[in-house]
């Protein structure tokens, strides 16, 4: 990366940060979170990047909100991010920030941020899915703080509000964090059948085994190959909101993109509707189980 200084500001009044669904008629003790489906890039950001939106979208969880919206419509509140995770990744901790990306970072410790920062996929992505540098210079640390204030914090405030609302009504809450995974990874992880779903529970720490089992069994009965905690055991949202002693449980769901879309051109395939129906039925099965759950 060059020493060129990249300095811009974003007009956040032009952006709709998230979409929310069924936040009033709540019938199940669950919240759906879809943090990576966003495909919106601030125009000011695009003017200072090296690649087209098509390449920048490679890590996007396209259409995941649409896959699960039938479950939400049946009585589960949902929040879905509109802004691309490349701009700011709400499924990362704010401390997962690479100091070497900035010309004016206040800390001298260039080892801060953790593993994801070192590979370029921290809270502010440095690289694309094809391992290309997104920026050709150094960012303004203050501008990134504006991303946190106007995008990151806004999403998490809404998610927390929905969790609090569910807890107030039911006394506990299950947060299902909904994602998709590249089909290439799904084919490489097992020697036999490709993975269709991966359910992450922080290796059985984020929710009771029976919650995980009821959801997994529903998907398996529909003919899907479901892996546990590999290749994904859960990320920031799964970890951050997990408080079993307070009755807040979490699970991360990853869906093989090849099941429902053409990954090269970001288009749904003919199996989309059937997959959406299967997933939504499994989610509602978990929801019905939770109605009888005693925390």
Image: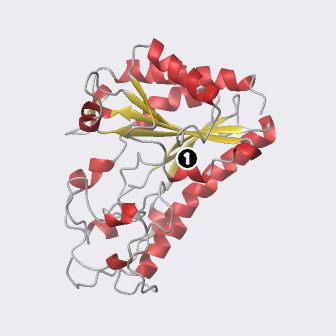
Where residue 164 sits: x, y (%)? Answer: 73, 47
Quadrant position of residue 214: top right
Q: Which residue is drawn at 40% across and 77% down?
A: 9
Where residue 45 sits: x, y (%)? Answer: 32, 68
Q: Can residue 87 be seen in this view?
A: no
Residue 90 against residue 256 in the figure, above or below: below
83 or 288: nearer the viewer? 288
118 or 131: nearer the viewer? 118
Where residue 200 sits: x, y (%)? Answer: 49, 38
Q: What element carries label 1?
A: helix
Q: Which residue is drawn at 47% across and 24% down?
A: 279
For this view, does 247 lie left or right of residue 159?
Answer: right
Q: Which residue is drawn at 38% across and 60% down?
A: 116
Residue 213 against residue 10 in the figure, above or below: above
Q: Residue at x 68, y 45 (%)?
A: 163
For this view, does 26 lie left or right of residue 88?
Answer: right
Quadrant position of residue 67: top left
């Amino acid at each position: 990366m060059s020493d060129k200084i990249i300095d811009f500001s974003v007009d956040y009044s032009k952006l709709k940060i998230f979409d929310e669904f069924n936040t009033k008629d709540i019938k199940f003790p669950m919240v759906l979170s879809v943090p990576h489906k966003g495909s919106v890039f601030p125009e000011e950001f695009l003017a200072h990047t090296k690649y087209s939106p098509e390449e920048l979208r490679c890590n996007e969880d396209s259409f995941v909100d649409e896959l699960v919206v039938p479950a939400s419509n049946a009585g589960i509140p949902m929040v879905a991010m509109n802004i691309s995770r490349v701009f700011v990744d709400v499924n990362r901790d704010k401390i997962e920030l690479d100091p070497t990306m900035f010309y004016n970072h206040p800390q001298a410790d260039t080892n801060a941020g953790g593993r994801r920062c070192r590979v370029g996929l921290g809270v502010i992505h440095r690289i694309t899915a094809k391992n290309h540098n997104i920026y050709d210079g150094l960012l303004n640390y203050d501008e990134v703080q504006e991303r946190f204030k106007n995008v990151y914090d806004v999403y998490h405030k809404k998610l927390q509000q929905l969790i609090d609302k569910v807890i107030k009504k039911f006394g506990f809450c299950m947060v299902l964090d909904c994602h998709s995974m590249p089909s290439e990874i799904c084919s490489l992880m097992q020697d036999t059948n490709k993975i269709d779903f991966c359910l992450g529970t922080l290796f059985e720490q984020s929710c009771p085994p029976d919650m995980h089992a009821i959801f997994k069994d529903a998907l398996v009965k529909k003919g899907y190959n479901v892996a546990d905690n590999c290749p994904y055991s859960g990320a920031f949202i799964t970890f951050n909101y997990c408080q079993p002693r307070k009755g807040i449980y979490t699970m991360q769901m990853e869906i093989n993109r090849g099941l429902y879309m053409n990954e090269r051109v970001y288009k749904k395939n003919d199996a989309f509707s059937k997959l959406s129906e299967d997933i939504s039925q499994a989610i509602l099965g978990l929801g019905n189980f939770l109605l009888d759950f005693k925390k």
